[in-house]
Image (tube, helix red, strand yellow):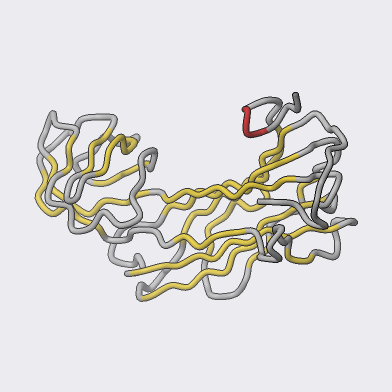
Amino acid sequence: MRDSIYDNVKLVGGSSLMQNVTGSSIIYGAGIDTISMTDAALRVSIAVPGGTSAPTAASLVFKLQESADNVTFTDALDNTSTVIGFTLAPLIGATGNTASGSNVVTTMSSVAGITVGSIVTGTGLPTNGAVVTAVGTTTVTLSANAVSAQTGTTLSFTTDSVARIEGLGLNRKRYLRAAVTPTYTGGTAPACAVVAEIVQGGPPQQLPVTSTVSNT
């Protein structure tokens, strides 16, 4: 049996990109060495700022790139010749009502893009934040109770996604990096805190493949 990242075996890697992402130009992360590994995942988490300077909307396009020498990078393709990656549109400016001692936020203005595991912060919640455990049509259930009652309080949620990367050492070049192109609407200081990781699994084995590039 092959050990794999998808079996949570021997996880290594590093953060290719970890910074506040602003502007509208593409931003490139650092190359991550994948030698001796068999598969990996591009894992991204983003958080948006609160306050009056926050953008009203954001869309961040993430893609994977690869290089043989950690200098010249090209887009990494899956076995359908599609660039490996995804687009994240974080929920910004969502409001809801909290009740002291309750872990349910009610009357949410929107729940679009909120997923189980998202970290949420805002007035009325614990200062170290809470994690979303369930999402309803107009409610969000949290891992911790609110500390005060708030009506129409603005909440910030993290947004996450993962793309599979297979065939390291076979169809993939040695170095991988993340790249992101942001688009913001409104706000005087638009920025999102982004962490993009190349998480890897192993050990290496020469596996049979039927295509010239790996599956995602």
- Above or below: residue 104 compared with residue 173: above
Q: Is residue 157 left or right of residue 197?
A: left
- In front: 107, or 208? 208
> Percent position (x, y) of residue 209?
81, 46
The quadrant where residue 26 appears = bottom right
Front in this rendered view, residue 130 or 83:
83
Q: Give the image quarter of residue 86.
A: bottom right
* Snapshot quadrant of residue 30: bottom right
Q: In the image, is 95 to the left or to the right of 202? A: left
- Image quarter (top left, top right, bottom left or bottom right) of the N terminus: top right
Counting every numbered tag in the picture gives 0
Residue for point 80% across, 36% down? 37
Find the residue positioned furthest to the front. Answer: 210
Is residue 211 among what the camera can see? yes
Q: Decide if residue 81 is on the left or right side of residue 129.
A: right
Could one spot residue 129 in this view of the protein?
A: no
User: Measuring 85% from the left and 35% from the top, which residue is drawn there?
Assistant: 36
Q: Residue at x 50, y 63 (%)?
A: 87
Q: What residue is at 33 percent from the left and 67 percent from the top?
A: 53
Outermost right residue: 69
Q: Is residue 163 above or below residue 1?
A: below
Give the percent coordinates (x, y) of residue 55: 36, 68
Q: Is residue 28 left or right of residue 175?
A: left
Expressed as whole percent of the image width and height from the top left, the position of residue 54 reads 35, 65
Nearer to the camera, 86 or 15: 86
Q: Nearer the viewer, residue 75 or 25?
A: 75
Rendered location of residue 90, percent (x, y): 39, 59
